[in-house]
Structure formats: C-alpha cells, structure tokens
Image (cartoon, rainbow, N blue to C red):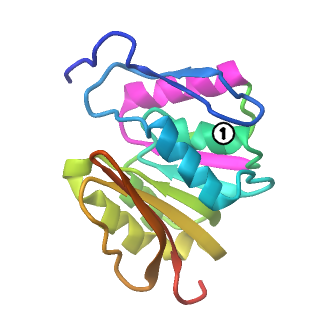
Amino acid sequence: MTALPRGRNRVRIIAGKWRSRIVRFPAAAQLRPTPDRVRETLFNWLGQRLDGLSCVDLFAGSGALGFEALSRGAARVVMVERDRGVAAALRESAASLDAAGAEVVEADAIAWLARGGERFDVAFVDPPYASKLALAALAALPARLNPGARAYVESAEPLSPPPPWRVLREERAGAVRYALCDLAIPT
C-alpha cells in the first residue's frame, strides 16, 4: 500500500445532520473518495433527502457515500469493505458520528451480494477503477434491490451497463465518470 499525501485521508460530509463533519480513513493509495462536487450532483439526482431508505455502499472505502446517505436521512446503510483496516476505520467513523443506521460488513462485495438477503433502495458502486468490478456488481445487484431502486456507479471509463440496467443520468468530472442507473424491468 502506498500512502496518500498528508491530509488527503479525510473527507467532509457535505449536507444533512452531519454537515461539515470530517470522516477519516487510512492513507492508502487505493482509497479514492468521491469528490464533493460529484457527491453533490449525485444527491441532487437522488432528491437530496433519502428519508427512510435502505442503502448499500459496495466497495465502501472512505465511507463518503454511505455516511453522506445517512446524514441525509437514510434509515440504514450497509457498507461492504474487503480490507480489514479500512473496515475498522469505517466502524470508528460510524461510532464517532453515532451512526446507528450504519453496518460495516468485512467481505468481498461480489461474494456478499451472491449470498442473498436484505434488499435495498439505493446502491453505491464505486470499486477500484482498475478492477473492472463495477459491471460484476451491476450483474449481481438486481436480486438485492427493491422495486424502483437505483444504483450509482463510478468508473474511469464510459459505463455501458448490461441489461436490465439503463442509465438515467451520467456526468464526468475530470477522470471520474459517474452515472445513476435503474432497472428497465421491475425487480
């Protein structure tokens, strides 16, 4: 693991009950928090408030998306993170925020999705860009989503989600490409 430059291992929650609170995460090169501008656009697309919704943050990393969702009223966010140290930092951040709706699961995201179980209203899919895991996650997600659910996906390359997914909105900010998708057929 290569460390990030000093001060880059934190992210600010941009809105909601924890507005301006800082979430810290390990200084690891593979952690790339979603930039403020991109998060603001995403939550504009989702309607700013996520009151009562259940979310899953796959490849949670810094937890920026999951904690932002909780700050904006999500009832529950399951953060799935494979790296033990990063998962521990997510638990520490949840405790410092008193985030009762947060659950951190230390697991491989694709394997965790395949186990079945709880269904979600919003999915955040932001894997390491070089991994090509975004499409694998989208393929596994439909069985874990409620009707009308949406998925946010980040990648370094243009996204062409497989059926039954359709892109509702997409943008680019520097090297980040991001899209909001839903299922073209009911789940």
Residue 3 is situated, as x and y percent measured from the top left of the image, at 25, 17
Pointer 1 residue: 102
The answer to which quarter of the image holds residue 1 is: top left
Q: Does the magenta stretch include residue 108?
A: no
> Bounds of the magenta span?
76-97
Rendered view: 158 above or below 103:
below
Query: The C terminus appears in which quarter of the rendering?
Result: bottom right
Residue 139, above or below 132: below
Residue 133 percent across, percent down from the top left:
29, 58
Does the magenta run of residues contain 94?
yes
Left or right relative to 71: residue 13:
left
Q: In this view, does 29 lie to the left or right of 169?
A: left
* Residue closer to the observer: 78 or 34: 34
Give the residue at x 75% y 35%.
Answer: 100
Secondary structure mainly formed by the magenta segment: helix
Q: Residue at x 44, y 37 (%)?
A: 35
Residue at image position (51%, 36%) is 36
Q: Residue 179 sits in which quadrant?
A: bottom left
Task: Evaluate whether residue 9 shows in this view.
Answer: yes
Q: Is residue 37 left or right of residue 129?
A: right
Q: What residue type is labelled 1?
A: Ala
From the viewer's side, name the closer residue of 91 and 34: 34
Is residue 118 visible in the rendered structure shown here? no
Residue 74 location (% of width, % of height): 73, 49
The picture quadrant where one finds residue 134 is bottom left
Total marks in image:
1
**Secondary structure of residue under mark 1:** strand
Neighbour class for label 1 at 10 Å: few (<14), some, many (≥20)? many
> Which residue reaches farthest bottom?
185
